[in-house]
Amino acid sequence: MDKKKIPEILAPAGNWETLTTAVNAGADAVYLGVKELNMRATAKNFELSELPKIVGFCHKNSVRVFLTINTIIYEEELELVKRIVSSAKQEGVDAIICWDFSVISECKRISMPFHISTQASVSNSAAANQCLSLGAKRVVLARECSLEQIKEIRQHTDIEIEAFVHGAMCVAVSGRCFTSQFLYGRSANRGDCIQPCRRSYTINDTEEDKELVLESNFVMSAKDLCSIKFLDEIIEAGVDSLKIEGRTKGADYVKVVVESYRRALTAYKEGKLDDELKEELEEKLSTVYNRGFSKGFYRGVPRDSDFADQYGGVNTKKKVFVGKVANFYKNIRVADIIVQDKGFRKGDELVIIGPTTGCIMQKIGSIEIDKGRKIGSAEKGMTVGVKLDEIARKNDMVYIIVENDQ
């Protein structure tokens, strides 16, 4: 592969805040779902009627839009499939991500480009070539493929290859898990998994009525994938698209992850992606939500060390709600912030999130009150002015970043 040929960064978008953030952070493409028939039903998702605005915004910024229709499709949903695919075609969506043949056939019928979802578990070149013969432009490889297997697949197919490089992993092969369905009636295969695998469990001895609690061994909770330290190898394996998981995560996560992988790709292109930068970027990635990092299947089958040893995230930092923007003065780039909860000080890292703003993250250089009087900190109940490097908007939500042990 030509070292100058850089794959795209494909970012998740679960709402307008994360969509705007992904575009501003340097994504080449975004993937998203409307409220029906996608594998992240727990995300806010978008209304079908929003597609014109989404596509217009993304295309204006030279960002492609991929729409997911990647759940199991039932008979009574066939007309809905036709309506969604037709709308996507009409509004200029760049491709549908799917695997059910009802969606594939509808895409083919109206000449709508489509990609084969990771739910199809494509893990060899024969399967990839069969997808190509169906008319698919791209396959999203099964997450269970190793780097060596991806290299082999690349040598024997001309179809575009997309692979996950960062985010949550599933204990089940390509997400085929029934635990959430059995326990709570919410199917992972319909995009409605509530992730009971992430919890601790007990073992019961039915003969002796004894119980063991697996306190420090979350046997079904896989750590998150982070490939930044071997991203150059993924690029050189011939992957065309680097997919970031996270349609249910926040705008701060999307910003940090997309910007980190963009920096890595730029450095690779310039021959500067060295160990020092990889270490720096992994440390940055550890600040936003994660369950600990692993290499996934890229180096082979995951081992015990690739599973979590505690519940929830182990990110080193977290955002804490402060209040909201009451007004923004463009000529002087100052935001009036109503402090509704936790206060903040000069030098703290501020996060401002909104549907049009996306996500702004910056150190607080000064805090003012009473038309220019500088103060060192802002407390609950105050309205203060903070100078920003970027444009914020009224009603944007405001947070500060703190250490995760606070």
Image (cartoon, rainbow, N blue to C red):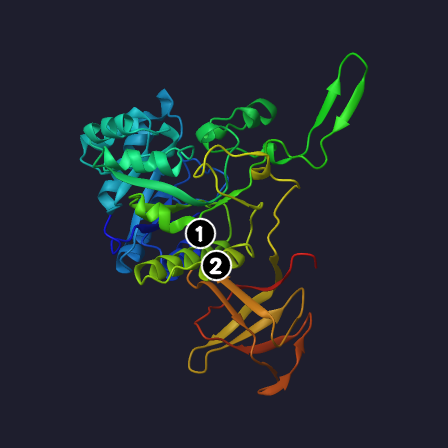
Asked if residue 65 is positioned above or below residue 71 in the image, the reply reads below
Which residue is rendered at x = 36% and y = 36% of the image? 148
Q: Quadrant of residue 379?
A: bottom right
In the image: residue 279, left or right of residue 322: left
* SS type, badge 1: helix
Instruction: Note whether residue 71 is visible.
Output: yes
Q: Which image quarter is the C terminus in?
A: bottom right
* SS type, badge 2: helix
Q: Nearer the viewer, residue 342 or 179?
A: 179
Task: State the residue position of label 2.
Answer: 281
Of the numbered discs 2 and 1, the one sitting upstream in the chain is: 1
Asked if residue 280 is positioned above or below residue 244 in the image, the reply reads below
Of all residues shown, which one is farthest toward the top?
207
In the image: residue 257, left or right of residue 8: right
Q: Are marks 2 and 1 in contact (CB under 8 Å)?
A: yes
Question: x and y percent of residue 316 in the render?
Answer: 61, 56
In the image: residue 226, left or right of residue 47: right
Question: x and y percent of residue 170 in the render?
Answer: 51, 34
Which residue is rendered at x = 54% and y = 71% of the image? 326
Question: x and y percent of residue 309 in the render?
Answer: 65, 40
Question: x and y percent of residue 336 in the render?
Answer: 55, 75
Neighbour class for label 2 at 10 Å: few (<14), some, many (≥20)?
many
The amino acid beneath tag 2 is: Leu
The amino acid beneath tag 1 is: Ile
Task: State the residue position of label 1.
Answer: 228
Which residue is rendered at x = 33% and y = 26% of the image? 100
